[in-house]
Amino acid sequence: MTRSLDLGCGEKPKNIFGASEVYGVDARTDLSNKVVQCDIAIENLPFQENFFDFVTAHDVIEHVPRVIYTPTRRLPFVELMNEVWRVLKVDGQFYSSTPAFPNEAAFSDPTHVNIITEKTFIAYFDYRHNWARGYGFVGSFEVTHQAWQGEHLVSILKKRAI
C-alpha cells in the first residue's frame, strides 16, 4: 500500500504517483473525503511521522510566505519543508510544480509571496548544500529531478535519512 498527500488540493487531491491511498489538505472549509482542513502557511500537517510515500504541491508553495511576524518571527516555507520531510517515509518523494522566476507568472498573481527559482531546492534543501539548516530546516532531501514545464518549475526531492 502506498499513500500520497496533496497540499492545497481543493476538493479533490491529485494522485500523480498512482498511490493506493490519497489524502489532501487545504485551507478551505468545504472539504470532504480524505481532505483535511489545514493552513499549511501557519499549521503543522495533521499526520504522523513517516506516513506518506509521496507529498505533492501543485501551484501552492508560491503562496506560503517566507517570513511572517505573529508577533515573533517565523519562517513558514522552511517550517512547511520540515513538515513535508517529517510526514514522508525515508526515500519518499516530494513533488512541486510552481510558477517560478524568471517567468512573469511567478510575479503576476498578488498572492504569490514566495518566488521559487531553479536554485531554491538545490541550494537550500538538498543535502549537498542545505543552506536552509541555518534557518531551522532539520531534514535532508536529495533533488532528483528538476525541469521546466512551461512557466512552471517541476522539482522532485527524495527524503534522506539523517
Image (cartoon, rainbow, N blue to C red):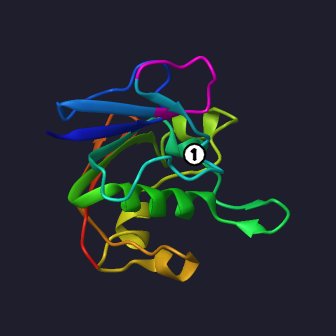
Q: Residues within 10 Å of mark 1 (few under 14, many from 20)?
A: many
Which segment is the magenta one? 25-33
Residue at image point 30% right, 76% down: 127
Q: Position of residue 7 (x, y in %)?
A: 45, 38
Q: Main secondary structure of the magenta part?
A: loop
The front one of 49 and 114 is 49
One can see residue 1 in this view: yes
Q: Quadrant of residue 111?
A: top right
Q: Position of residue 95 (x, y in %)?
A: 31, 46
In the rendered view, tell whether residue 42 sits above or below residue 39.
below
Q: Position of residue 47 (x, y in %)?
A: 43, 48
Q: Which residue is mark 1?
A: 40
Residue 3, magenta (yes or no): no
Q: Quadrant of the C terminus?
A: bottom left
In screen coordinates, is 143 left or right of 87? left
Which residue type carries mark 1? Ile
Residue at image point 27% right, 45% down: 54
Query: Quick one: SS at disc 1?
Result: loop
